[in-house]
Amino acid sequence: MPWKLKDLTLKKSNRTHEELLKLAVNAALQAGEQILDIYNTDFAVETKSDDTPVTIADKTSGQCISRILAESGIPIISEEEDICDYSARKDWSQVWIVDPLDGTKEYIKRNGEFAVNIALVEDGKPVIG
């Protein structure tokens, strides 16, 4: 993870929603480019502990998004990374929720039905997505 729990504060980012939206859009576009670069290759498919598939595109996209969103100083919960214990995150006033490649099964089938999902949640409510 690009951030460490000890580095987090419970303060909200001093960036505007417009600035954070631009950051999220940039992250999604860059991750999307990486996903599409891998799309027509002979990528391997692995299985996660919950018996769902994961590819290098999922992982690469997740790393790209995390690197870019880390600039905001807001913690990230991503489907492709370990999630810290609820006791450590329950008081976060802001958090990015990320699915770096939503629709991995469709991606594997190469049917074009997949997306990059990024949302900012403030005080338990989604405000950007």
Image: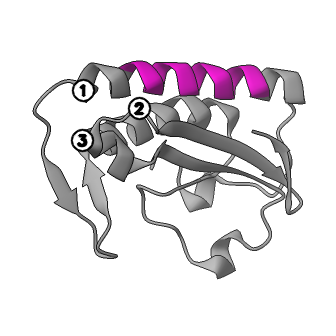
Helix, strand or loop at label 2? It is: loop
Residue drawn 54% across the image and 20% down it: 29
Query: What residue is pinned by disc 3?
Result: 56
Q: CA distance from mark 3 to mark 2?
A: 17 Å
* Amino acid type assigned to the residue bearing label 3 in the image: Ile
Could you tell which of marks 3 and 2 lies nearer the N-terminus? 3
The verdict on residue 24 being magenta is yes
Q: Residue 23: where, in percent of width, then height?
A: 68, 23
Quadrant assignment for the C terminus: top right
Residue 127 left/right relative to 32: right
Q: Residues within 10 Å of mark 3 (few under 14, many from 20)?
A: some
Spatial CA distance of label 1 from label 3 is 8 Å
In front: mark 3 or mark 2?
2
Q: Of helix, strand and loop, which mostly describes the magenta segment?
A: helix
Q: CA distance from mark 2 to mark 1?
A: 13 Å
Q: Which of the colour schemes (rainbow, by chain, secondary structure, one colour) is used?
A: one colour
Residue at the disc numbered 2: 112
The residue positioned 60% from the left and 60% from the top of the image is 6
Task: Specify the quadrant of the image occupied by residue 117.
Answer: top right
103 left or right of 108 in image:
right
Q: In this picture, which residue range is highlighted in magenta?
A: 21-33
| Residue 26 screen position, x and y as percent | 60, 19
Q: Tag on residue 38?
A: 1
Q: Mark 3 falls on what kind of element?
A: helix
Contact (CB < 8 A) between labels 1 and 3? yes
